[in-house]
Image: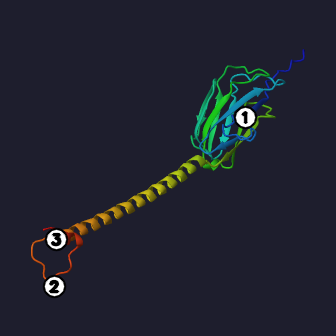
Amino acid sequence: MPTPTPTLTSVSDLVLTKTHQNSENDKNGGDDHLFMVGDKVTYTLTATNAKTAGPVVSPNAIIVSDIIPIGEKNLQAFGSGWSFTISSTTSPAVITATFVGPFPVKAGESLPPITITAILTEDAVPSITDTATVDTPRNIGTYSTATDTVFVEEQQNPQHHDRDNGNDIHNNNGNTNNNNGNTNTNNSNSNSNNIHRRTNSHRNWLPGLPLTGSDPTPPKTAASHYEAS
């Protein structure tokens, strides 16, 4: 009786990588991955079947799970050839991506990338680390877990602070000028009152009745008027 030929089985070895696009706020040319609260962060996850592995065939599902800790909101995920479920758009949350084909996934083949975007919140300060895994039945899984860390700082706006200080200075100067203007107006009012009083005094000495010895000495202008008449 002939010896039966052993049946070969598919043993895959999926490798996962996860990276993020550098923020525009990076101070060291992208080396420190510096983000600010409120910035958008974009992650890229890529699953690859190792070159020495067997193919992944249908109906074996390939599933990528990404655990998002507290510190991100407005979570979205997309990628060609994947279906997605998101437990919550505000972390903590779990994003699950299921590969829908085509199969088989041969040795050395990379699946279409998965893109995850989010907005960083204050809970992400000073850093936030996401952990993702990829799996399929009979997967060796030597490098099936990937992590990525984003460093985050509080949002700062020194220009806004400077503008506020400038407004305060201008406003104070304006108030000082207004006060000076009020002082000048008050002085003008005082001068007007003095002129008004002098005018009334002059009018009170107009001729009408003869002077008596008990009358006070009239102003020089009034006396000149009487002498002229």
Q: CA distance from mark 2 to mark 3?
A: 19 Å
Q: Which residue is mark 2?
A: 214
Point out residue 33 in the picture as x, y percentages from the top left corner. 71, 40
Q: Residue furthest top?
A: 2
Q: CA distance from mark 3 to mark 1?
A: 112 Å
Q: Nearer the viewer, mark 3 or mark 1?
A: 3
Q: Which residue is mark 1?
A: 18
Q: Give the mark, 2 or 1, whose residue is nearer the N terminus.
A: 1
Q: Is residue 157 visible?
A: no
Question: Which residue occupies 65% across, 47% down?
Answer: 124
Pointers 2 and 1 in contact (C-beta within 8 Å)? no
Q: Which residue is mark 3?
A: 227
Sort mark 2 into few (<14), some (14-19) or many (20+) by Cα contacts within 10 Å.
Answer: few
* Amino acid at pointer 3: Glu
Q: CA distance from mark 2 to mark 1?
A: 112 Å
Quarter of the image that includes the C terminus = bottom left
